[in-house]
């Protein structure tokens, strides 16, 4: 359900691209350091967004290093990480495990099963370190799974559940109303936009999609309304060093990914 919290690279400056990449590489560094190569394979820009946002809000001490890696073995590159990078790495592993488990349940994917089995050994440690977040993630993903199995065609139920997940991810300290609200509505958006993009394919294949009952509704208007709700919280956050990149993701990157995914689905449907 992720893959939307990504910057529109085309409108970032050269320095902003470098800064964005340094946080991405910092998250990769923490995944490798804490979970090895299987951890690196779960790397996403979505959790890079979480890292950058929490870094800007709470201003932790950053570690800045130059390093080489498997992807870039020759030329050194900057990697920036801090305590929130380590937090995001753990959440990335936890969410990836359940994503692969979902793929196993939906498609009986052998590849997903192998990855889930490799990630499973980290779950207990992450649950002990972050009991609140992991409990909310488990409970709400199980709820989403149950409404899918029961074919309950009410997008509000699933979107609110995924909103709870994103709210707990962003409001790590449990005391920031604006991070909580921003995360909640981002989660709602991610759940609904996933359903919008898969809508025609799911109708064709006769598989569950929560928007079936709203087939004639303006889905784009629904998405815009959700992001207006998100902005009412996001705009109140006091951001500084990463603000331009974070603004890019919220106001442009999300929509760029939406359009990209729609084109991919339309292209696939024509084959």
Image (cartoon, rainbow, N blue to C red):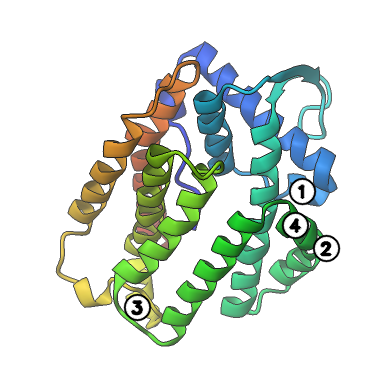
Residue 93 is at least partly visible in this image:
yes
**Tag shown at residue 204:** 3
Residue occupying the point 67% across, 74% down: 109
Please tell me how many numbered marks the rendered image carries: 4
Query: In the figure, 4 relative to 30: above or below?
Result: below
Q: Nearer the viewer, mark 2 or mark 1?
A: 2
Give the image location of residue 157, x and y in percent: 34, 70
Task: Judge by depth and name the residue closer to the eye, 8 or 74.
Answer: 8
SS assignment at label 1: helix
Q: CA distance from mark 1 to mark 4?
A: 18 Å
Work out whether mark 2 precedes mark 3 in sequence or the reverse, and give the earlier one: 2
Query: In the figure, 51 relative to 98: above or below?
Result: above
Categorize mark 1 by other alpha carbons within 10 Å: few (<14), some (14-19), many (20+): many
**Tag shown at residue 121:** 2
Q: Nearer the viewer, mark 2 or mark 3?
A: 2
Of all residues, the one furthest to the bottom in this rendering is 150
Of all residues, the one furthest to the top in this rendering is 15
Residue, disc 1:
39
Q: CA distance from mark 3 to mark 4?
A: 43 Å
Task: Judge by depth and name the residue closer to the eye, 183 or 255.
Answer: 183
């Amino acid at each position: 359900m992720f893959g939307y919290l990504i910057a529109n690279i085309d409108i970032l400056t050269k320095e902003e691209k470098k800064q964005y990449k340094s946080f991405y590489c910092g998250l990769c560094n923490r995944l490798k350091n804490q979970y090895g190569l299987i951890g690196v394979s779960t790397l996403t820009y979505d959790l890079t967004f979480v890292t950058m946002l929490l870094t800007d809000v709470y201003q932790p001490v950053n570690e800045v290093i130059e390093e080489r890696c498997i992807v870039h073995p020759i030329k050194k590159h900057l990697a920036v990480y801090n305590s929130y990078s380590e937090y995001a790495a753990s959440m990335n592993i936890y969410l990836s495990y359940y994503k692969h488990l979902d793929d196993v349940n939906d498609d009986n994917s052998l590849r997903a099963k192998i990855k889930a089995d490799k990630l499973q050994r980290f779950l207990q440690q992450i649950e002990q370190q972050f009991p609140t977040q992991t409990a909310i993630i488990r409970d709400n993903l199980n709820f989403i799974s149950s409404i899918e199995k029961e074919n309950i065609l009410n997008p509000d139920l699933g979107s609110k559940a995924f909103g709870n997940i994103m709210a707990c991810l962003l409001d790590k300290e449990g005391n920031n109303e604006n991070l909580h609200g921003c995360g909640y509505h981002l989660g709602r958006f991610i759940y609904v936009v996933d359903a919008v993009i898969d809508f025609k394919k799911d109708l064709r294949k006769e598989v569950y999609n929560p928007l079936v009952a709203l087939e004639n509704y303006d889905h784009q208007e629904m998405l815009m309304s959700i992001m207006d709700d998100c902005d009412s919280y996001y705009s109140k956050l006091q951001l500084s060093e990463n603000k331009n990149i974070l603004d890019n993701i919220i106001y442009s990157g999300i929509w760029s990914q939406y359009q990209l995914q729609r084109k991919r689905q339309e292209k696939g449907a024509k084959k």
